[in-house]
Amino acid sequence: MTSPQEELLPGTRRALLHRIAVAQSEGRAPSLVAAVVRGGRMVWSGARTSVEGEVPDGDVQYRIGSITKTFTAVLVLRLRDEGLLDLADPLEKHLPGTGVGEVTLLDLLAHRAGLAAETPGPWWERTPGSLRPQLADVLGERPLVHPVGRRFHYSNPGYALLGALVEKLRGAPWEKVLRREVLEPLGLHRTTVEPVAPHAGGWAVHPWADVMRPEPLENLGVMAPAGQLWSTTDDLARFAAFLAAGDDRVLSAESVREMRTPAAPAEAADVADGYAYGLGLELRHQHGRALVGHTGSLPGFLACLTMGLADDVSAVVLANCTSGPAPFTVAADLVRIVAEAEPCLPAPWRPLREADSAVLDLVGQWYWGTYAFGLRLSADGLLALEALSGKGRRSRFRPDGDGGWVGLEGYYAGEVLTPVRRPDGTVSHLDLGSFVFTRQPYEEGAPVPGGVDAEGWRGIL
């Protein structure tokens, strides 16, 4: 992937370079590389290093840790889209004998299966996978630490189970399936399960002295689907573009949108922090914007891929140290710098090619009781309902093919808005999940639940 630096203004490029320079220096990282994606392609990349004359570029591999989970989730969604499974299926249906067969595939994807966060035994990230050759070795005698489906609890063993599921249904090792179905179609040729030169070495930097020592680089075995992969900023920039728009060779735009939708019950602390989890993707709020992606860490490495979809800006940050710079904070700052310095230009307004008069009858001002709403027809053929006070329930609606409109988000997601017409064809009112919307507040003659006072509106009694 090329990096047309000239597409960002010099001041923006300088601000991006300054941010990663501060991160590498203050975080005491042996090296740090970063990239920014806009419009589906990389528009900036940069690097800082402690080794003079050996600045890493977008082709140098770093270990990406739990960003691997996003790749595994893509494989599971592919199986679902092919009709080989349903996310509501219990694990036992496809992978019997695990001892936790009651958990659903959705539970595993969203970290709500109640499984332990880590494996039993020695620290799995710093020891050979050969110490845990079977799924039973990563689940242990007490695999469930919470009731199934009740809360978000991040689980690395959960994604080992999903990797085993992929292997069972595809009849091939997880890494071969990943290569064939995701990496090759997307052109991610430098994303591998084992390091391939050029690659960074993983380091532990002493917390109280400017010295360091190498970290072990272990193959994680059956835990590989949770955190094994190595990748580059070039490859992860391509992967970010895919996660933003989809690619029918791998996963549709609708399915990647599903991955970006919260799917796990949020803890109170997570709500306060603006954190949620979808299907293999983390959802966060930073600097007033919604960001979607995943972080990753393994001994010797830190990583983050995050996307600001509203701003069409994504960022990748990779470093080769066990602790130091906060990769999500840095990546979020890169998104913010570009979004604020060079905001997206809106598409030119253009009128609709055609408009159905029956739909135009629905637009305009409506009242639910005394609350004023506006209903607008957008260029994509959807109806958008919004409180005119600026506060209140809002949603977009798509036609259902039977004259009604189905809500797409918020309180009205899945609810049907039905236009009710008089014998002469004019619109009497709107019915939205039993709520009656009328053209005037408590309009006389309208079927307002509870009726309308016959004496009408009045002043001070």
Image (cartoon, rainbow, N blue to C red):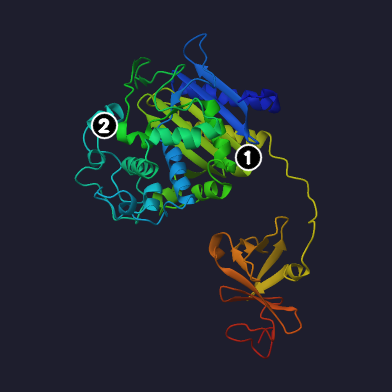
Can you identify the residue that label 1 sits on?
A: 312
Vertical position of residue 196 compared to residue 348: above or below? above
Quarter of the picture containing the N terminus is: top right
Q: Which of marks 2 and 1 precedes in the sequence?
A: 2
Question: Crowdedness of circle 1 by 10 Å Cα count: few (<14), some, many (20+)?
Answer: some
Between 243 and 175, the one lying in front of the other is 175
Q: Can residue 275 be seen by looking at this rendering?
A: no
What is the secondary structure assignment of the residue under circle 1?
loop
The spot of residue 208 in percent (x, y) is: 34, 20
The spot of residue 398 in percent (x, y) is: 63, 62
Q: CA distance from mark 1 to mark 2?
A: 38 Å
Q: Which mark is residue 256?
A: none
Q: Which residue: 34% across, 41% down?
A: 164
Q: Quadrant of residue 387?
A: bottom right
The spot of residue 268 in percent (x, y) is: 40, 53
Quarter of the picture containing the C terminus is: bottom right
Vertical position of residue 163 compared to residue 424: above or below? above
Q: Is residue 98 left or right of residue 453?
A: left
Q: Is residue 177 left or right of residue 456?
A: left
The spot of residue 121 in percent (x, y) is: 21, 35
Vertical position of residue 75 compared to residue 87: above or below? above
Q: Are marks 1 and 2 in contact (CB under 8 Å)?
A: no
Between 251 and 388, the one lying in front of the other is 251
What is the secondary structure assignment of the residue under circle 2?
loop
Can you identify the residue that label 2 sits on?
A: 123
Q: Is residue 197 left or right of residue 257?
A: left
Q: Is residue 84 left or right of residue 352?
A: left
